[in-house]
Amino acid sequence: DGGITQSPKYLFRKEGQNVTLSCEQNLNHDAMYWYRQDPGQGLRLIYYSQIVNDFQKGDIAEGYSVSREKKESFPLTVTSAQKNPTAFYLCASSMRTSRRTDTQYFGPGTRLTVL
Amino acid sequence: GQQVMQIPQYQHVQEGEDFTTYCNSSTTLSNIQWYKQRPGGHPVFLIQLVKSGEVKKQKRLTFQFGEAKKNSSLHITATQTTDVGTYFCAGPAPGGNKLTFGTGTQLKVEL
């Protein structure tokens, strides 16, 4: 089946620890995104990548880091510098076209709780 | 920067009633997309509108794109419990292949 996978579904960490969230896609999409969603809130863009070995900061990049070494994978690290990391993290991907902004396909998300 | 607002933030309806959510952008959009997120789930793409004044229908859902391409609406006729969730609009953001999502409208349907 084609799609986006995120693991784990639930993640608990102690304050001060870095944690890496996984995102893998087999849709052959060039672009990948990370969003943060807080309860009852919309989606805020953390980082995005339009091509392998390149990524850009979104609206709330502070305290997060990413890498894009493979087309299929876009892991997100929540560092200890992120002051309020407890949230629902969503990964998405899309085709990369020059003429229009393509639709995004989302993974099931990871709920991170920092204790 | 670009802002995309939706109203209302929450809506409770009785099953069978109609529902409308409105989306307003601070900038002109080349297209508008709509997504639905079920409780506990992830956003799922519903539709994309491209042309000024465009209207598209999906069964009981009607989507409109404003003439000025700065606003859009989603209307659901005769809501059902399966319509429960949060509806987001999204428009292309300046500077690359990314979207700015609206603030969302959470719909609850009561029997």
Image (tube, grey):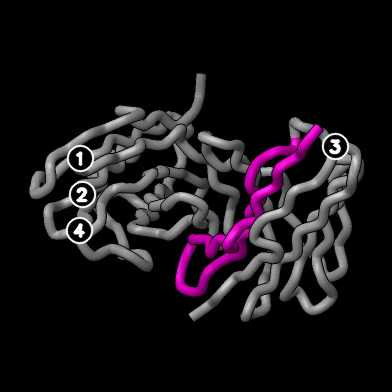
> Which residue type carries mark 2?
Val
Q: Position of residue B87 (x, y in %)?
A: 66, 50
Q: Are marks 2 and 1 on the same chain?
A: yes
Residue drawn at 46 percent across, 72 percent down: B95
**A10 in relation to A90, above or below:** above
For the residue labelled by badge 1, is the local secondary structure a helix, a strand or a loop? strand
**Between marks 4 and 2, how big is the CA–CA gap?**
7 Å
For the residue labelled by badge 2, is the local secondary structure a helix, a strand or a loop? strand
> Which residue type carries mark 3?
Glu
Chain of the residue under label 2: A
> Which residue type carries mark 1?
Thr
Relative placement, left or right, of A82 versus B108 is left
The part of the chain drawn in magenta is B83-111
**On the image, numbered disc 1 is attached to which residue?**
A20
**On the image, numbered disc 4 is attached to which residue?**
A82
- Quadrant occupied by the C terminus of chain A: top left
Q: Do labels 3 and 4 share a chain?
A: no
Quadrant in the picture for residue B61: top right
> Which residue type carries mark 4?
Gln
**Magenta stretch encompasses residue A113:** no
Relative placement, left or right, of B35 versus B49 is left
Relative placement, left or right, of B76 versus A39 is right
Q: Where is residue A112 in the image (x, y as percent from the top left)?
A: 29, 40
Q: Do labels 4 and 1 share a chain?
A: yes
Chain of the residue under label 4: A
**On the image, numbered disc 3 is attached to which residue?**
B15
**On the image, numbered disc 2 is attached to which residue?**
A78
For the residue labelled by badge 3, is the local secondary structure a helix, a strand or a loop? loop
Whether pointer 2 and pointer 1 mark residues with C-beta atoms closer than 8 Å, the reply is: yes
